[in-house]
Image (cartoon, rainbow, N blue to C red):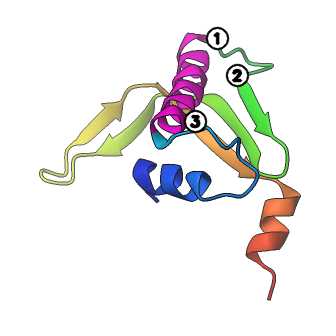
């Protein structure tokens, strides 16, 4: 799904305020994802805890530090060291898992 498809699907939902426009909805969605991105960029990761965002019924996003590791250059076959980096992991909620696996 693209950003425009998300905006279109949300815009077609029933129960939205009657005066809301696609442009206003786009600004709300951009602000939401912008704030989430800023939160994860600025937060610190410790051994005990990383930054977390939980949306009930959907899942939890967690900032994690991926340690330095050994790798191999696929072109030359040389061994290389891949530096440590940060990543975001996602764990779906039980509700989402059961919805996905419903027959």
| Gap in angstroms between the C-alphas marked 1 and 3 | 13 Å
Crowding around mark 3 (Cα neighbors within 10 Å: few <14, some 14 to 19, many 20+) is: few
Q: Which residue is mark 2?
A: 51
- Where disc 3 sits, the SS reads strand
The foreground one among 87 and 54 is: 54
Tell me, for residue 44, which label it has, or none.
Answer: 1
Whether residue 43 is in magenta: the answer is: no
In magenta, the rendered stretch is: 23-42
- Give percent across and percent down for residue 102: 81, 81
Q: Give the prevailing secondary structure in the magenta stretch.
A: helix
The foreground one among 99 and 16 is: 16
Q: Which residue is mark 3?
A: 88
Crowding around mark 2 (Cα neighbors within 10 Å: few <14, some 14 to 19, many 20+) is: some
| Gap in angstroms between the C-alphas marked 3 and 2 | 9 Å
Crowding around mark 1 (Cα neighbors within 10 Å: few <14, some 14 to 19, many 20+) is: few
- Where disc 1 sits, the SS reads loop
Kindly check if marks 1 and 2 are in contact, taking CB atoms under 8 A apart as contact: yes
Q: Who comes first in sequence, dot 1 or dot 3?
A: 1
Residue 96 visible? The answer is: yes
Q: Is residue 95 above or below residue 56?
A: below
Q: Residue at x 66, y 46 (%)?
A: 90
Q: Who comes first in sequence, dot 1 or dot 2?
A: 1
Q: Residue at x 76, y 47 (%)?
A: 59
Q: Is residue 61 above or below residue 46?
A: below
């Amino acid at each position: 799904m693209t950003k425009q498809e998300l905006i279109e699907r949300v815009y077609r939902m029933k129960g939205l305020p009657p005066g809301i426009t696609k442009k206003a909805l786009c600004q709300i969605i951009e602000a939401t994802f912008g704030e989430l991105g800023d939160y994860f960029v600025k937060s610190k990761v410790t051994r005990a805890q990383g930054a977390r965002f939980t949306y009930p019924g959907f899942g939890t996003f967690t900032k994690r530090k991926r340690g330095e590791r050994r790798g191999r250059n696929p072109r030359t076959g040389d061994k290389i060291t891949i530096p440590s980096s940060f990543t975001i992991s996602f764990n779906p909620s039980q509700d989402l898992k059961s919805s996905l696996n419903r027959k």
